[in-house]
Every structure is written in C-alpha cells, then in structure tokens.
Image: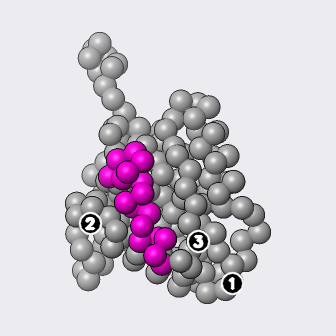
C-alpha cells in the first residue's frame, strides 16, 4: 500500500447522515456502520406511543459510545407524531453539523402496535420534504435482518448498488430497502 493510500479519508468523510430511530435494533447497526465509514451521523431517537424507554437518553448513550471509539455522532430526539418537529429536523441538523447529504428512516414492521409503521412512513415523508435538494432519502422496512440492511445503506451511499429496490414513483434520490 502506498503512503498516500494509508492516509486516505474514510469513504463517507464529509457526509452528514440523519438516521431516524437510530437507537435500537436495525437503526443502531446502520448508525454504527455509517459512522465507521466516516459519516457524521445525527442519531435521532424517535419517541412514540408504546416506547418503553427514553429516546433522547438512548440517543445520547449511543453517541457517547461511538465518540469513545473516535466516531462522530450527535444525539437528537423527535416525537414521531409531531409533524412540525419532524419537518424542522433537517434544518436543525444543518445548523448544528452541516446539511444532511442523506437521511435514513427505519420503519417498524407492519404488525407493530399503535400503527407505528404508518407513523414512521409519515415521519419518512416529512424528513424527505425537509432535506436539501440533492440529499439521498432511504426508507428501511425493518422486516429484514439488521446487518444486511446496514450494509445496503452504506453501499447505497457509496454508490455501489446493494440489495435495494427503487420505486418508479419516487424521486431518484429516494430509495426503499425492503427485506
């Protein structure tokens, strides 16, 4: 390996990625992989009915854990049922760490209680509406295995087509990844 190659920045260096419901399960794995690839990640804990823990605290703990190994992640919290707060999230992140180059929203399984799949699809639409024009929007259907989904997200952002399916009705920058 050449000396220049040994000093190459990580592949997602300079990218700011917003990950909604980033604190548990699939979102946590996606967040860790994005950080490891060099992205600065806005870790968004999404509060909602039926959540048995504190989304803001979970986001802060995950960011502390990632910072402890030299990765960049900042905690955020949003009420998944507060559309105005969700719409404002990309602008808040842009003011704090820079404009998001991508957003990933983890959508719970269809059989999740309290209509959470529909709630998170609405969150995904609101986040997409607030993103800068050229930002990539990725919605993940949580029914697949977390590690495979995380790999697909990182591959998508690196431009190396993973296991993704793009809907013709969605803009080019919007992708749905399904299990």
> How many angstroms separate mark 2 from mark 3 (CA)?
25 Å
Q: Give the mark nearest the N terminus, 1 or 2.
A: 1
| Extreme residue toward the top, this view | 3
- Note whether 93 is above or below 170 in the view shown: above
Mark 1 lies on a secondary structure that is helix
- Note whether 149 is above or below 10 in the view shown: below
How packed mark 3 is, by other alpha carbons closer than 10 Å (few <14, some 14-19, many 20 or more), is some
User: Is 142 left or right of 95, judged from the image as shown?
Assistant: right
Quarter of the N terminus within the rendering: top left
Residue corresponding to mark 1: 113
> How many angstroms separate mark 1 from mark 2 (CA)?
30 Å
Residue at figure coordinates x 52%, y 46% from the top left: 74
- Note whether 147 is above or below 125 in the view shown: above
Q: Which residues are magenta?
A: 83-99
Mark 2 lies on a secondary structure that is loop
Residue at figure coordinates x 27%, y 78% from the top left: 170
Residue corresponding to mark 3: 79
| Extreme residue toward the right, this view | 52
Residue 35 is situated, as x and y percent measured from the top left of the image, at 48, 42
Q: Nearer the viewer, residue 166 or 131?
A: 131
Q: Is residue 85 magenta?
A: yes
**Camera-side mark, 3 or 1:** 3
Residue corresponding to mark 2: 173
Mark 3 lies on a secondary structure that is strand
Question: Magenta region, mostly helix, strand or loop?
Answer: helix
Residue 73 is situated, as x and y percent measured from the top left of the image, at 51, 43
**Mark drawn on residue 157:** none
Q: Disc 1 vs disc 2: Cβ atoms closer than 8 Å?
A: no
Residue 108 in view (yes/no): yes
> How many angstroms separate mark 3 from mark 1 (CA)?
16 Å
Q: Give the mark nearest the N terminus, 3 or 1.
A: 3
- Note whether 37 is above or below 112 in the view shown: above
């Amino acid at each position: 390996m050449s000396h220049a190659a040994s000093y190459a920045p990580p592949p997602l260096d300079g990218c700011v990625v917003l990950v909604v419901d980033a604190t548990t399960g699939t979102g946590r794995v996606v967040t860790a992989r994005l950080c490891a690839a060099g992205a600065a990640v806005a870790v968004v804990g999404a509060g909602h009915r039926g959540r048995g823990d504190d989304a803001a605290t979970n986001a802060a703990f995950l960011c502390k854990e990632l910072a402890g190994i030299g990765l960049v992640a900042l905690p955020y919290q949003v009420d998944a049922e507060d559309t105005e707060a969700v719409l404002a999230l990309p602008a808040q992140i842009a003011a704090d760490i820079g404009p998001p180059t991508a957003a990933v929203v983890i959508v719970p399984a269809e059989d999740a209680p309290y209509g959470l799949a529909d709630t998170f699809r609405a969150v995904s639409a609101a986040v997409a509406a607030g993103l800068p024009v050229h930002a990539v929007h990725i919605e993940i259907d949580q029914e697949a295995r977390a590690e495979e989904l995380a790999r697909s997200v990182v591959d998508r952002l690196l431009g190396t087509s993973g296991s993704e399916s793009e809907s013709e009705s969605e803009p080019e920058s919007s992708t749905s990844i399904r299990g």
